[in-house]
Image: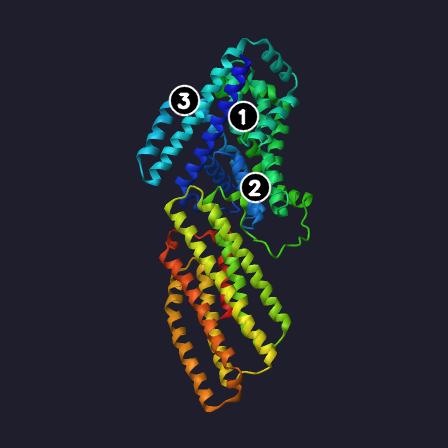
């Protein structure tokens, strides 16, 4: 009997976890654009943040997933601690929705749900309807897993060994909480553990009072996943992880002396034991919000004190925004990749601005600095491309797929610009250092004008990318052909000076012509970037920069200072 019980528990738990994963992924894909809007509207308003936390957690079907995502976003400096605290509290309420659904005896419709979901998946080609099918299948597997576990537990109602274990645990509340916390941490889901607690209560194996202790442990246990993900990340993300477990512990410590009256109150809400457990879970999390929400400012001050800022030595040769743990949330991952590409564009822009400085000052240190930046761009481009490739292996909507492909093309063009600077322009600069020849006065002025036009084109493209401005992108495409004409004109001017016998022009001829050509090639890649924005459905995407409301303004200020 025990062998059958263990196999049933393992199989049922596997179906529950797999069903929740399918359900979470399909709901995120269905939400798509709405999830981006939710994330882009994270504010310091605690009530708005709380409701957003509820919505996000319903979509992810896991408060653990929500907290891990918040840790990743704060680590990437997309959102701040103040913006996440109310979201974390809302996440606790959001995760109770699953428990309430489980409380309704839907196990009898588990197999029909699996059948309907499977038929939709196999008999429809449209991605949208397939995602609906996956969501239904996920629900079906979740309830099927619960049914299997319930059927396996039923024969054990009269088993003296199990009863003795549960009686012992009932007399050890702290041990009960620790066991529930450990299991919740291992499966990364409080909902799954609460489902088991509900089954134990329905079978009469645990009282509602004992179930409440298990609930406390399950709620605290899921917090440790976020703590693990915060190790080695920014101090801000560590504060977010600590905040979640702090909120949960406060609720536990406040209610712990009143477990008996709390259990009596819960017992009056319904006669169904499963519903009682679900109600206890919901009321505990609502109570947690009520006692913590008014004091978020004080919590923030306290967290800043216990986890103070330290002078972090940033690794200059690593991405600043993309986070591996967020790849499974493609909507967020694409947004972070966009931020990383904006960071790459900033580095490339700096390199382009410095091109003529290197030629003019004849200083090897400046050249070395430019080569370092190019190496940095290479690393960023490679890792961002790999990150996007991993996102492309996730379930994506058509728009998200197009966006990811577009971003890969943009990264490729920025990398090519870096290669032009490294392989051609720096070599031309070294040749000039070795020969110690100077450009003619007219030739130098032509190079300055060409360079200024390239800088202006790049500035417009960077602002267009950072602010999702398709009008600016079209301006870039319209302006670039003028640079082709300008390059041709300057080439003819240089040839005229050669015919007239200008010594400086003769000495620097190959360097001059190759440099103008290299600048033109840079402009072609800038035009490619703008073309990608125009032609590859960038307009369907929400401006992820709104998550950090200052980003758009920062890039506009950069543009003003460079114009």
Residue 64 screen position, x and y as percent: 54, 35
Residue depicted at x 42% and y 37%: 27
- The residue where tag 2 is placed is 85
Q: Earlier in the sequence, mark 3 or mark 2?
A: 2
Left or right placement of residue 142 versus residue 218 in this view: left
Relative height, residue 176 to residue 223 (above, below) = above
Q: Please tell me which residue lies in front, 512 or 224.
A: 512
Relative height, residue 301 to residue 374 (above, below) = above
Q: Earlier in the sequence, mark 1 or mark 2?
A: 2
Q: Earlier in the sequence, mark 1 or mark 3?
A: 3
- The residue where tag 1 is placed is 193
Binning the other alpha carbons within 10 Å of mark 2 as few (below 14), some (14 to 19) or many (20 upward) gives many
Q: Please tell me which residue lies in front, 96 or 526.
A: 526
Residue 211 screen position, x and y as percent: 56, 20
Q: CA–CA distance between discs 1 and 3?
A: 18 Å
Q: Is residue 278 visible?
A: no
Mark closer to the observer (3, 2):
3
- The residue where tag 3 is placed is 106
Left or right placement of residue 245 versus residue 495 in this view: right
Residue depicted at x 52% and y 37%: 65
Relative height, residue 516 to residue 348 (above, below) = below
Quadrant in the rendering for residue 242: top right
Count of numbered circles on the image: 3
Check if mark 3's residue and mark 2's residue have beta carbons within 8 Å: no
């Amino acid at each position: 009997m025990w062998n059958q019980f263990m196999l049933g528990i393992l199989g049922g738990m596997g179906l529950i976890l797999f069903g929740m994963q399918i359900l979470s992924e399909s709901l995120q894909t269905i939400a798509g654009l709405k999830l981006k809007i939710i994330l882009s509207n994270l504010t310091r308003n605690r009530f708005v943040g709380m409701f957003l936390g509820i919505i996000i957690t319903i979509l992810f079907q896991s408060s653990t997933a929500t907290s891990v995502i918040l840790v990743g976003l704060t680590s990437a400096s997309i959102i701040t601690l103040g913006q996440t605290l109310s979201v974390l509290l809302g996440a606790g309420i959001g995760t109770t929705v699953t428990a309430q659904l489980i409380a309704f005896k839907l196990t009898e419709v588990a197999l029909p749900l699996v059948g309907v979901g499977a038929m939709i998946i196999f008999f429809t080609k449209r991605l949208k309807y397939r995602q609906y099918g996956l969501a239904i299948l996920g629900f079906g597997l979740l309830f099927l897993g619960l049914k299997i576990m319930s059927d396996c537990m039923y024969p054990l109602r009269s088993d003296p060994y199990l009863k003795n274990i549960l009686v012992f645990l009932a007399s050890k509340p702290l041990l009960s909480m620790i066991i529930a916390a450990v299991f919740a941490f291992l499966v990364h889901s409080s909902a799954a553990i609460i489902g088991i607690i509900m089954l134990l209560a329905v079978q009469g194996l645990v009282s509602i009072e004992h179930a409440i202790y298990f609930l406390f442990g399950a709620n605290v246990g899921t917090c440790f996943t976020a703590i693990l993900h915060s190790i080695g990340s920014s101090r801000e993300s560590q504060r977010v992880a600590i905040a979640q477990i702090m909120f949960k512990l406060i609720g536990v410590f406040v209610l712990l002396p009143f477990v008996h009256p709390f259990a009596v109150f819960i017992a009056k809400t319904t006669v169904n034991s499963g519903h009682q457990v679900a109600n206890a879970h919901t009321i505990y999390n609502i109570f947690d919000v009520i006692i913590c929400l008014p004091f978020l400012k004080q919590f923030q001050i306290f967290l800043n004190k216990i986890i103070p800022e330290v002078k972090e030595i940033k690794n200059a040769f690593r991405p600043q925004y993309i986070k591996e743990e967020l790849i499974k949330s493609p909507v967020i991952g694409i947004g972070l990749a966009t931020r990383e590409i904006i960071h790459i564009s900033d580095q490339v822009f700096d390199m382009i601005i410095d091109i003529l400085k290197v030629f003019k000052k004849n200083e090897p240190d400046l050249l070395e600095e430019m080569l370092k930046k190019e190496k940095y761009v290479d690393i960023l481009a490679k890792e961002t491309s790999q990150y996007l490739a991993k996102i492309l292996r996730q379930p994506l909507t058509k728009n998200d797929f197009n966006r990811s492909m577009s971003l890969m093309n943009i990264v490729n063009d920025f990398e090519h610009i870096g290669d032009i600077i490294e392989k051609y322009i720096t070599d031309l600069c070294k040749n000039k250092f070795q020969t110690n020849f100077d450009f003619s006065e007219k030739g130098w002025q032509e190079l300055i004008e060409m360079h200024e036009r390239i800088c202006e084109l790049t500035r417009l493209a960077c602002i267009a990318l950072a602010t999702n401005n398709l009008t600016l992108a079209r301006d870039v495409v319209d302006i670039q052909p003028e640079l082709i004409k300008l390059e041709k004109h300057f080439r003819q001017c240089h040839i005229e000076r050669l015919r007239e016998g200008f010594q400086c022009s003769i000495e620097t001829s190959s360097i001059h012509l190759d440099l103008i050509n290299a600048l033109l090639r840079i402009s072609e890649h800038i035009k490619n970037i703008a073309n990608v924005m125009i032609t590859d459905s960038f307009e369907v995407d929400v401006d992820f920069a709104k998550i950090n409301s200052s980003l758009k303004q920062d890039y506009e200020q950069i543009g003003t200072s460079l114009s």
